[in-house]
Image (tube, grey):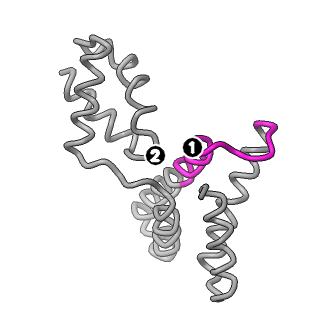
Amino acid sequence: MTITERLTQDMKTAMKARDKQKLSTIRMVKASMQNEAIKLGTDSLSEEEEMTVLSREVKQRKDSLQEFKEAGRDDLVEGLQFELEVLQAYMPKQLTNDELEQIVQETIEEVGATTKADMGKVMTAVMPKVKGKADGSQVNKLVLQQLS
């Protein structure tokens, strides 16, 4: 079952349960996916494209959550945390730090990177492997650490 199909099914469930907050979050994600499909000029998105949209939405929520916490906007933090929880349910299982380190190390060996100047090559090779399964900033830190 694709992410879009799961979203549609969960949207119906949320409507029946009158769960307005979850319904709103699901509708927002579905709208983002439809906008992406329109932008790409297709009727439906591939699973990879769906994952890209979902990852972008999660990243936006995390960034906003951090900003709201720093600004002391607790009223907005709670709603964003709920949205994040809903979105995380559609994301694949996140890689552990050890698994991520192993992937980064293997990729560094594959590309033959030795210095920080090779960081771009490594990041370009690692990101498709961990798409949706790890945060880009975490990957960035590990690559930097391994190349130092």
Tag 2: residue type?
Gly
Residue 145 or residue 122, whichever sits in front: 122
Magenta-span inclusion, residue 52: yes
* In-image side of 93 versus 5 (left or right): left
Magenta residues (range): 40-57
Residue 143 at x, y = what percent?
27, 28
**Measured along the vertical axis of the image, is residue 69 above or below residue 93?**
below
Label whose residue precedes the other's in the sequence (1 or 2):
1
Residue 98 at x, y = what percent?
19, 43
Residue 136 disc label:
none
Residue at image point 62% right, 69% down? 25
Residue at image point 36% right, 39% down? 137
- Mark 1 and mark 2: Cα distance apart in space: 7 Å
Q: Main secondary structure of the magenta part?
A: helix
Quarter of the N terminus within the rendering? bottom right
* In-image side of 58 versus 72 (left or right): right
Residue at image point 65% right, 42% down? 46
Residue labelled with disc 1: 52
Residue 132 disc label:
2
